[in-house]
Image (tube, helix red, strand yellow):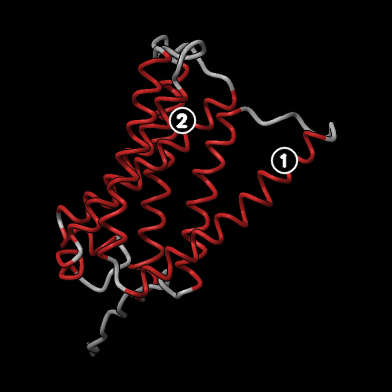
Amino acid sequence: MMTDEKTPATPRWVKKLLIPALIGAAVGFGASMAALQFIDSPAVGGLGKSASIAALVGVLYIVIGLGVAIGTASPNVGARFLNVEDADELREQKKLLTASGAGMGLWGMALIALALAAPDGPVPQAAALALGAGGLVIGAALSIPVYRQCDELMRAVNLEAGAISYALVLVVVGGWAMLAHLGYAAAPQPLDLLTLFYVLVLLASFIATGRRGMLTPR
């Protein structure tokens, strides 16, 4: 006797949260390994600890920016790994997300250029300054129209992320500076501070969006 059994549907949190997280982790790991191999290659010849960490954080920003770019370029694909209602939401926000993804990518490239700067890296200091400052400025310029076109919720998230960023910088950077001043820790290098700003701003953004319930599967 045959029974008609329905295959249980995959839970939404698995499709919208777990699977994308696993894919993102795999892509991020692969990009990090490729970056470390490049750093150790004859083209670079190795970097110090601060520069290596900065380069990896820059790669993370580029991976996030590329993910957003791919999702907006192909909404049907992006709806499968970005936390949105459907492909139509990506089409509606294409301009905003494209600018945001481009800004993330530029900030990542700026940090990588600074990490590869001479004398430790192969990039001349003048070129690293031009790339670093250019990436930061253009990325910031792209964020201005994005903020202006955000709805009330996203503006509130941005303001909250800014406040959280300030608190994290005060605690982490301020605490490190205090320990270094008292001789309990080595003083941070300038590149360490810049990398920390990148990391803490990203962390603050996740905290702010999470507090608003925007990280739950949609």
Q: What amino acid type should be assigned to the residue bearing mark 1? A: Trp
Residue 73 sits above or below residue 5 on the image: above
Other residues around mark 2 within 10 Å, as few (<14) / some (14–19) / many (≥20): many
Q: What amino acid type should be assigned to the residue bearing mark 2? A: Ala
Name the quarter where the N terminus is drawn. bottom left
Sequence-first disc among 2 and 1:
2
Q: Quadrant of residue 78?
A: bottom left
Q: Give the Cα distance between marks 2 and 1.
A: 21 Å
Q: Which mark is residue 201?
A: none
Camera-side residue of 74 and 179: 179
Which percent across, then down, holds residue 14?
38, 69
Residue ID at (54%, 61%): 163
Q: Quadrant of residue 218?
A: bottom left
Q: Circle 1 sits in a helix, a strand or a loop, which is it?
A: helix
Other residues around mark 1 within 10 Å, as few (<14) / some (14–19) / many (≥20): some
Residue 55 sits above or below residue 214 on the image: above
Which percent across, then down, holds residue 72?
19, 56
Residue ID at (37%, 68%): 155
Camera-side residue of 45 and 110: 110
Residue ID at (34%, 26%): 131
Q: Mark 2 or mark 1, which is nearer to you?
A: 1
Q: Which residue is mark 2?
A: 55
Task: Name the side, left or right, on which 81 lies relative to 133.
Answer: left
Camera-side residue of 204 and 26: 204
Q: Which residue is mark 1?
A: 176
Residue ID at (79%, 39%): 179
Task: Name the side, left or right, on which 3 lies relative to 205.
Answer: left
